[in-house]
Amino acid sequence: MGMTHVVDRRLNGKNKSAVNRERFLRRYRHHIKKAVADAVQRRSITDIERGEHVSIPSKDIDEPIFHHGTGGHREVVHPGNKEFVAGDTVPKPQGGGGGQGQGGASPDGEGMDEFAFQITQDEFLDFLFDDLELPNLARKKLKDTEAFKYQRAGFTSQGIPAKLDVVRSLRGAHARRLGLGGARKRKLRELEAQLAELKAHPNEPDPAFSPQDQIDALEAEIKRLKGNLRRIPWIDEIDLRYRQHVKKPKPATSAVMFCLMDVSGSMTQVHKDIAKRFFILLYLFLKKNYKRIEVVFIRHHTSAKEVDEEEFFYSRETGGTIVSSALKLMKQIVDARYSPSEWNIYAAQASDGDNWNDDSPICGKILAEQILPLVQYYAYVEITPQDHQMLWYEYEKILKQDPNSFAMQQIADPGDIYPVFRQLFERKAA
Amino acid sequence: MTGTAEKPPVGNKPISTTSEWTFDLIREYDEEIAKCAAEFGLDTYPNQIEVISAEQMMDAYSSVGMPVGYHHWSFGKQFLNTSKGYQRGQMGLAYEIVINSDPCIAYLMEENTLPMQALVIAHACYGHNSFFKGNYLFRTWTDASAIIDYLVFARNYVAECEERYGVDAVEQILDSCHALMNYGVDRYKRPSPISAAEEQRRQKEREEYLQRQLNDLWRTIPRMAGDDDEDERRRKRYPPEPQENLLYFIEKNAPLLETWQRELIRIVRKIGQYFYPQRQTQVMNEGWASFWHYTLLHRMYEKGLVTDGFMLEFLQSHTAVIYQPPFDSPWYSGINPYTLGFSIYSDLRRICEEPTDEDRQWFPDIAGSDWVETLHFAMKNFKDESFIQQFLSPKVMRDLKLFAISSDEDEDVYRITAIHDEMGYRVLREKLARQYNLSYREPNIQVWNVDLRGDRSLTLRHVPVDGVPLGDSTVEVIRHVHRLWGFDVHLESVDDGTVVEEFHIPPRHLEDED
């Protein structure tokens, strides 16, 4: 029949629904944010960086239309009768509103009054850190070669074979062939038509002209034209087009994050867990903000030590507490590796507030005089449900002096982690 | 129906023996199926078969079968729902989606096996396709050659509005229109065909004209005193006759809407109109397509073009498609339109070919007639309601073991009013037909009055059937009407001349109520 056209569409874009999905998430961002906040509290530390299951009450998501309610008289036809005969009565289920709508739960136990769906890891993090920002983010001088990138910059007639743009080149060649050959081809067609005409009536009695001469002349001309046409190259060097890229410096910022954590004996497992969760949030947040970020992990009891991520989050320690040891180490590291003129420096410190009493004023002094001038932002979280100790009061003094680059919050139980985190990094109205 | 056909005649070679499909094989199958379809006189639009992936199928799903759709969160919701079900394996994707357009576009999923692809081609490209082309509702209400262009126009227009007036403003209007989408059709008027070019050309004209008309309607300059009797004017309703096309009425008469908002209403209305025939022919359309995939593939088998293995796989899918769980099964969710439609058409063929005494008594005109002609007649000239009323036979009622059950608000029992026996056939047929009557399925709500000279409020009137009240989302829908109308909106349920229920947005103050 030949009326059917079969098309392979598999390579056409999928995700035609991406925009609609995005619209959906946008509309229900409040619900999703709440689900994300709940998830952060529920999940284990290693588990925070993945998608999330979100449920929204159906009543919030239904698209209302006019429909019949329950009540009145109603008659419905069903299939699969077994023993009923006309006139039988069947008791209505107790408490039911009548009608046939049983509602209730779906077979997999999921309530029908919830609309449930999955958001991806990226979406999860987006919602997690929505409206948060790193305070005092200043653009610092760039030093890394990483800060260059290649950008498309149109096409050029010279380049390496790898960058040859075939389509564009062939298009050029096609245009050139048309340009050079078009007029000749038209002429050729005219001459061939004339020739055919002459050959069709070879013995036209016109003494003034010899048909054979004309035929010869035409044939010679046709031959010349064909030769000309044949000499037009199918592709020529001037047709070639190469994709051009230029190297552009990228105005990126480099940042370094110091994570300071107390791992002394007074920090119970619960404390450490809370601190770790806080730092993980922070770490994810930073990773989202910067392509390039370095993180320095410092943990301390009576002495401080720079460790890697693994050790920072997962190893155990005991002993007393001298907080200033960590601050001193941080200062040393900054001096050695992170010049404040080139780096945005952030620091977050978590502790249970327990410190060797004589040490707390020292901490305040180091922080105010040596560290705060170097950093963009320093956040302190104290993980304790109890009354504050000396360290907190020392830090409060600093807060009064320098509220722009210093912040402190208390976390009493795991439920506070995310709200406190949000408070610390809330986007402030400009 | 018997699933086994006779042994294939020797001589023809099966088209294929594997279950892997290739584009060449799809073309070959299509060609052979087309030949079979021609033997039975199926008249179709040209086909465009598009092979797509499962993800693309989910995309197609979520835009409710529109190949091009404007953006809206509800399609995103639909998409999430579909992909969730699919990933959990709860739900297979439909094997196919087919679009009422010219050429008729049918999607085949790449995951399907070859027998499945053949089934889909027979079902969609020859079954549904010929239904779209032949059924009077589709012929009247849709214009297959214009729909794609129109959808592209609609998408661009909505996108333009979003850019100009913001995503939220557009979303609000669309939300409200969607709530009324089923009330965007004049059932008794033939619509003008839609065309994107025409829409674009006339948009400007319409803008000017509409504004002039509105100005007339809402002229607020007081007339000369004594020039008209105040009471007389109050008694006159506007519109003089109730209007069932709520969207149309709002588009043309809402006092405050901007032109682009009216255009959005129009777009939703036109798309609703395009789907209007589908809502009324589900049983007929799916039944027709199922009858033909069954018949055409059996014909292929008779010709020796497909193997026994092919038929087994095909019949397994076919059986699943037309399975009807009984009312007391956990999988029961109403009558399966595939089953009902397939059973009626198959039985019609039987009545034509091997009529019994019962058939001669029930269908004197049809019994013994040419079955191909009779089936085509049934497909072309009916909608679900009249189709069932006309062609549901006692045998199908017995096969499906249909029974009717009635429920009254003030009784604590259900009553079985009819079953598949001599006494019950006519009652059952009537009840089942009525179940497919749109105006029975959806509440009858019309524009009753606009207080032109007063507070500009809009009053809608609901006429209940059998005392069935409005559902619990009514207030929400009226909120949407209110958003579009811009002034107070009232809805009254009027049963037999008495107002039985009222809804008001904004809600009335308590003082007013008592």
Image (cartoon, coloured by chain):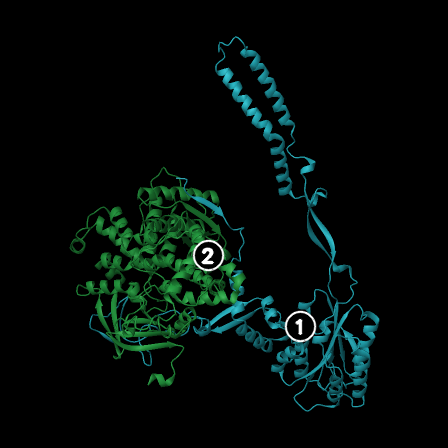
Chain colours: A cyan, B green
Of residues B299 and B334, the one drawn nearer to the viewer in this rendering: B334
The C terminus of chain B sits in image quarter? bottom left
How far apart are the alpha carbons under marks 2 and 1?
A: 39 Å
Under mark 1, the amino acid is Glu
Residue A92 image point, x, y percent: 29, 78
Local crowd at mark 2 within 10 Å, few (<14), some, or many (≥20)? many
Figure quadrant of residue A82: bottom left
Residue A206 in view here: yes
Residue B146 image point, x, y percent: 41, 50
Q: Which chain's residue wears label 1? A: A
Q: Is residue B84 above or below residue A365?
A: above
Of residues B39 and B325, the one drawn nearer to the viewer in this rendering: B39
For image coordinates 48% across by 50% down, the residue present is B51
User: Which residue was labeled with disc 2?
Assistant: B154
Left or right of A162, for residue B494: left
Q: Is residue B330 above or below residue A372?
A: above
Q: Which mark is residue A302?
A: none
Left or right of A233, for residue B348: left
For image coordinates 77% across by 85% down, the residue present is A321
Of residues B85 and A293, the one drawn nearer to the viewer in this rendering: A293
Of residues A135 and B400, the one drawn nearer to the viewer in this rendering: A135
Under mark 2, the amino acid is Ala
Q: Which chain's residue wears label 2? A: B
Figure quadrant of residue A213: top right
Question: Callout 2: helix, strand or loop?
Answer: helix
User: Which residue was labeled with disc 1?
Assistant: A133
Local crowd at mark 1 within 10 Å, few (<14), some, or many (≥20)? some
Residue A46 image point, x, y percent: 64, 72
Left or right of B58, for residue B451: left
Residues at circles 2 and 1 in contact by the CB criterion of under 8 Å: no
